[in-house]
Structure formats: structure tokens, C-alpha cells
Amino acid sequence: MGEILTPGFTGGLLDRADAMRHDDSALATAMGNWQARLLSLHHWEPEVTDDGRLGWTMLTEAPDDAEFVLLGLDNGRPRFAAILAGQGAPPPFRSPTLFHTLDRLRPGEAATFATARSLLDWHARHGFCARCGTATAIFRAGWGRKCPNCDAEHFPRTDPVVIMIAEHDGRALIGRQPSFPAGRYSALAGFLEPGESIEEAVRREIGEEAGVEVGAVRYVASQPWPFPSQLMIACIGQAVTDQITLDTNELEDAKWISRGDVLAVLAGTGDAFIAPPPYAIAHTLLHAWAHELA
Ligand SMILES: [Zn+2]
């Protein structure tokens, strides 16, 4: 019974205020608004209040050469993030403190952080035109960069990733990567390749990583994943066979797990494996499958 759990990093509370991105005078007014606030980040990590909200500061707290990205409006109050000159890109891995921080953030607040983190990361890594190599400049309130030499417009990327379990005879296929904490198993995952549909990517990834042939594929839910900018697309694939042939370059182990074992693990009463954290969509996916919601 129940409903599919809301995936982490979704349910954002800000009005994205697209019209303001195209209106320089409205943007200038918003920046001068006494209620305007700047997302407080320290080394790319958010400040979190005791009640799970993001910390904010005044725009004047940013260095003089900072540039501002309009995250949106919170009940009409402008919310920004700052691009800091010379900061470079965030580290490719989340720090242990960020894991802890994400556990404490309220869901809608985590969505605002995810938006800011992905946007700022994109700016940090796209300072030069991909067409002609000239340094680009921020435009559309931080939702794009433009080349002053060839006029090419560049927009933030979102990279689709399929994340899925296969199911066979009441069991789900889960796997673990060598980098996972001890005991952790999760859904399999991989980037979509050019020229591929979601269903084709699900079948290819399960085939490559676990050697399991999959027929029908159904969509369950999606989530933005801001490390740095993936869109995780959660699916369930109907396995034709249950013989596992592991690709040990990708996975350390993969196994079939019963619905009862997944239910027990999610309820905190089972020890068949350690589930992914609640903000990961693999958690949403396993919950939906175990409770037969998808
Ligand atoms: Zn250019």
C-alpha cells in the first residue's frame, strides 16, 4: 500500500521566474530588492539550519567580482547563488560531511541546493566557447553563457542516466560497486548513449553489467542528481532469464533478492543487504518495487 516515495532533490519550492531571465531591468530590480538573498555555500557545500533549511546571506556578502545566478523567487523574494571568480569546479566526489548534510536537509530545500550546485558547477567548467574557444560571458540571469566572438549560446547540460532493477519471478536484481560502503547493494545504472532510447539503455546496461536479458521496460520515477548534473531515470526491466554473468569491471557482485527481503531491509528489520540512502532514487525504486507500486 502507499505511494511512490518522492525522489530526493525534487519538489523544489522556488518559482523559477523564467521571464525575469530575459528582462535585465527586472533582474536588476530583483538584485536590489531588500529581501534578495544569496545561498550560503562553503566549498560548494550548503549551510543547514537546525530545522533542515538552507542558510542564506546578503548579496553584499559576495566578493566584488562575483556574478549572480537567479535561482528563483521564494514567495516573491529573489534567491541567488554566486559564481566566484577563480574558484574552479567542485571535487568529483561528495565529501563525508555533504552526505551528512543531505540527510539533514528538508526535501524542497535539497532541490534548491541541487539546482544551485549543478548550475555553479556548469559555469565553473564552461568558461570557454565549445565552438571557437573564446572566453564566454554569463547571460539570461545565469541560465546560459554566450560567446562574444561567434555569438554561440551555451546552456546548462543535464546528462540522462538510467537506473534500474531487473525483476524475475518475484525477485529483483541488485548489485554493488567496489566503491560502495560494506554491505550496500543498489540498482544498476549507466549513462544513456547518443542514439539510444531509455528502454534500450536499460536493456543494454543490465546486459553488460549482469549478463541478464531484459524484455519489457517500465518507467517509475526520475530525479535530478547534482554531482554534477545527471537526470536519473528509474525503471524496472522484465528479465527473460535469471542467469547472472557479472562484468567485474563494473560490479563487484550482483544478486537476486526476494520482495520479502527488500521489504524487511526497508523496514529496518532485515539484513540481506544495506539499502541506498533515502535521498537516492534507487531507494525510491526499491521501495516502489517491493510495495508493488510500479
Ligand atoms: Zn565562440
Image: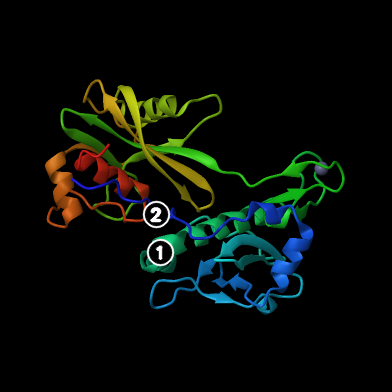
Residue 102, labelled with which disc? 1
Q: Is residue 214 left or right of residue 35?
A: left
Q: Is residue 94 visible?
A: no
Name the kind of residue labelled 1 in the image.
Leu
Q: Position of residue 6 (x, y in %)?
A: 35, 51
Residue 213 against residue 45 in the figure, above or below: above
Q: Residue at x 74, y 62 (%)?
A: 26
Q: CA distance from mark 1 to mark 2?
A: 9 Å
Q: Position of residue 125 (x, y in %)?
A: 66, 52
Q: Is residue 254 left or right of residue 44?
A: left
Cβ atoms under marks 1 and 2 closer than 8 Å: yes
CB of mark 2 near ligand 1 (< 8 Å):
no
Looking at the image, residue 168 sits to the left or right of residue 190; the answer is: left
Q: Along the line of sight, which residue is nearer the eye, 79 or 164? A: 79
| Badge 2 element | loop
Q: Amino acid at mark 2?
A: Gly
Asked which quadrant contains residue 75, the reply is bottom right
Q: Which mark is residue 8?
A: 2
Vertical relation: 3 (above or below) 79: above
Quadrant hosting residue 189: top left
First along the sequence among labels 1 and 2 = 2
Q: Is residue 125 above or below residue 77?
A: above
Q: Residue at x 23, y 21 (%)?
A: 241
Q: Quadrant of the C terminus?
A: top left
Q: Residue furthest right?
A: 149
Residue lying at the far front of the rendered structure: 76
20 horizontally vs 49: left or right: right
> 152 or 94, which is in the foreground?
152
